[in-house]
Image: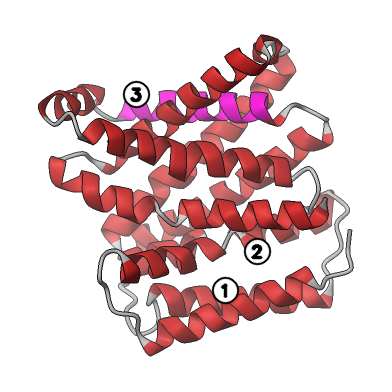
Amino acid sequence: MKTKAYLFIVLASVMWGTSGLFVNFLAPYGLTSLQMTAIRAMGAAIFMGIYIFVSNKRLFRVSAEQLVLYALGGISMFCTQSCYFTSMQMTSVSTAVVLMFTAPIFVMIYSVAFLGEKLTPQKTVSLVLMIVGCALVSGIVGGLKVNIIGILLGLLSGIAYSAYNILTKIQMRKTLNPSTATFYCFLTSGMLAMVFSKPQGIVTVAMENPHTILLMAGLSAVTCFLPYFIYTIALKTIPAGTATTLGILEPMAATIFSVVILGERLSIASTTGIVLILFAVFLLSKSKEE
């Protein structure tokens, strides 16, 4: 069961790594980052809603306490994406990626302090290797653009991402259904994105370019609905810190997709980063902690 959970985290990371492909195809149509965030979250909420409606309608029922917990998860999800995209615009993609993936540090600290998880030497080494590898893969080495506000927003996206993981872990410890939790998180995040974006622009793009509807559906399903769903299931089995650390495979996957599909060149630094990350995953998989 634990092996399956690890595979779910890796698969989720690979799917998250396809985000750049969908953004690359949708951006030329004039969609803003917030609009794509809205498409991603609301579309995922619709997919999850359909799944619940078909499988078990009773999963829509939640108590006031559960709804608050789900809403907090949705707010964390929205803050992660919005701060990440804004930081990307104010600094650079590489800087924003690495800053967001400081999340494992915050999760580890919280998990050890409040959730009773142990910070083993093996986890510590794998975490350090992953952060260094992520920096190399993203290109931050030698390409950092200094913008204080942008850097602070990037760190905030990492904190928000860690908060989502922690809140999800709390939800799972309360034996709450992952489908219900994910649905209300998507819905909250999507509604917030709709408020701060201009949803009419999304409709205009879809009407003028009908083929973009498939890209929008893919953005929702492949980069949000499916990965978050299986990620939430995995958190029932493995520690939040471990899950978030494995999630750092996303930038590596994004780099590989950019090389193979978008024709970008893979530098020596990126190759070295991939090797470090894979070695870190190997160390983490050998951890004896339950």
Vertical arrangement, residue 133 with respect to residue 206, above or below: below
Image location (x, y in percent) of residue 44: 47, 30
Residue at the spot x=62%, y=51% of the render?
Answer: 162
Q: Nearer the viewer, mark 3 or mark 1?
A: 1
Q: Is residue 122 magenta?
A: no
Q: Kindly state the secondary structure of the residue where label 2 is placed.
A: helix
The residue indicated by pointer 1 is 131
The residue indicated by pointer 3 is 195
Q: Kindly state the secondary structure of the residue where label 1 is placed.
A: helix
> Looking at the image, can residue 240 be seen?
no
Q: CA distance from mark 2 to mark 1?
A: 9 Å
Q: Which mark is residue 190?
A: none
Vertical arrangement, residue 146 with respect to residue 111, above or below: below
Start-end of magenta stretch: 179-196
Q: CA distance from mark 3 to mark 2?
A: 31 Å
Q: CA distance from mark 3 to mark 1?
A: 34 Å
Residue at the spot x=50%, y=81% of the render?
Answer: 273
